[in-house]
Amino acid sequence: MITAKWKIAVLDTLMILFLMLFPHFGGLPMFVYPFVVLTLLWFYLKLYHQNFSSIGFRFSDLSVKAFFIGGAIGLAYAMVQFWAIGPLIDKIFQFKPANYHDFDFIKHNVVNYLLLLLLAAVLVIPYEEIVFRGFILTKIKQMAGTSKWTFAISGFITAVLFALYHYQEGPASVISIFIFALFITWLYKVFKGNLWYLIFFHLLYDVFMLTAIRLGYL
């Protein structure tokens, strides 16, 4: 007989699969699917008498400190990625260059560039952090038990899923994103699950990278 714990684990796994697949195959524009997915996720959490604060997203945690510390780390990491991690991956694996053609529309249009930064800041990045370091990491930790390795195993699996979620950017980018995901998961532990530090880290990282794409360096 399937216990309630196993039923929850099965439902959580199905929800994780939905979160991974729907944005790629749901046929919705990039600026629409986060609203749809977050709404469905909210209702899903409500089934268990939970909400977004239960998985680490609380407006009460928003602070200037989180912005400056998270953002500074994100900018520093972006520079390391651009000048060290990325070139090292290219040298070791000799993959084709990462596929950034989805961002060609910002290269010669400053309005598109600014609109994309705005969309990333208010929607896409908070969405990804709520989904991956909020919901998915939390649920995998619950399924993994309470051993001393629970966080490490859960963080590794979440990092793999986050990297695969960006498969369309090519293998070189997937490896870079996997390393990024491991690092940001470590930050999750350092900042005790406060997603705002991660959101600002991710935001400044993306600002740097999107600017590099716009200027033709990527």
Image: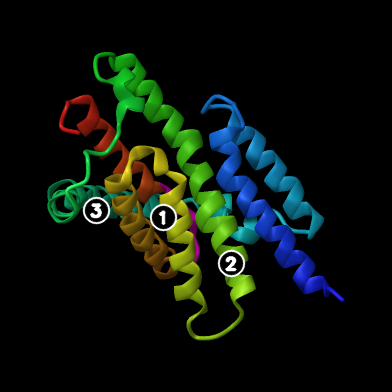
Residue 197: which disc?
A: 1
Proximity of marks 3 and 2: CB atoms separated by less than 8 Å: no
Circle 3: residue type: Tyr
Give the secondary structure at mark 2: helix
Residue 213: which disc?
A: none
Residue 209: image x %, image y %?
26, 38
Determine whether 73 is above or below 203 in the image. below
Residue 77: which disc?
A: 3
Give the secondary structure at mark 1: helix
- Tell me where residue 4 sits by quadrant: bottom right
The answer to whether one can see residue 192 in this image is no
Q: Nearer the viewer, mark 3 or mark 2?
A: 2
Residue 60: image x %, image y %?
56, 53
Magenta stretch bounds? 192-199
Residue 65: image x %, image y %?
37, 55
Local packing at callout 1 (Cα closer than 10 Å; few below 14, some 14-19, many 20+) is many
- Mark before the other along the chain sequence, 1 or 3: 3
The residue where tag 2 is placed is 140
- Mark before the other along the chain sequence, 1 or 2: 2
The answer to whether one can see residue 9 in this image is yes
Give the secondary structure at mark 3: helix
Circle 2: residue type: Ile
Is-magenta flag for residue 60? no
